[in-house]
């Protein structure tokens, strides 16, 4: 299942941007965004709230912003990690 593949990639700990993920999963960017929102609604992903004013020069999070999509970052929740582990064991 494509959602399981997406979750496994995200749970690997490797930072991704949406264009890269879309290419790896061979899906349209709009579909990928919808899948991420579905995973967020299911509490498998959590949006990370950044508290910055878009002034990046010298910001300690400047490098992190490069892995976002339009200023959005998600992290995998404990529920998401468990689901990714179950998916790995089931298809491993």
Image (cartoon, rainbow, N blue to C red):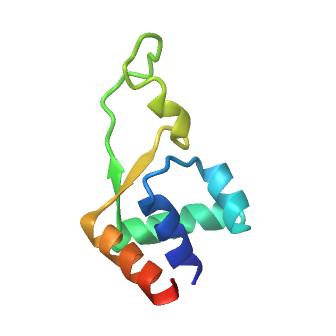
In the rendered image, the residue lying farthest to the bottom is 90
In the rendered image, the residue lying farthest to the top is 58
Residue for point 46% across, 65% down: 37
| Rendered view: 58 above or below 64 | above
Q: Position of residue 82 (x, y in %)?
A: 31, 74
How many labels were placed on the picture?
Answer: 0
Residue for point 50% across, 77% down: 4
Q: Position of residue 85 (x, y in %)?
A: 37, 75
In the picture, residue 11 is in which quadrant? bottom left
Task: Between residue 64 and residue 72, name the one nearer to us.
Answer: 64
Residue for point 52% across, 86% down: 91
Q: Quadrant of the N terminus?
A: bottom right
Residue for point 67% across, 50% down: 19
| Rendered view: 6 above or below 66 | below
In the rendered structure, the answer to whether residue 77 lies left or right of residue 69 reads left
| Rendered view: 1 above or below 28 | below
């Amino acid at each position: 299942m494509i959602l399981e593949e997406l979750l496994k990639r995200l749970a690997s700990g490797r930072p991704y941007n949406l264009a890269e993920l879309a290419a790896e999963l061979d899906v349209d960017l709009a579909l990928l965004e919808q899948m991420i929102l579905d995973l967020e609604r299911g509490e498998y992903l959590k949006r990370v709230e950044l508290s910055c004013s878009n002034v990046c020069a010298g910001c300690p999070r400047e490098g992190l912003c490069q892995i976002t999509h339009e200023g959005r970052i998600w992290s995998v929740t404990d529920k998401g990690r468990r689901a990714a582990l179950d998916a790995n064991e089931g298809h491993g």
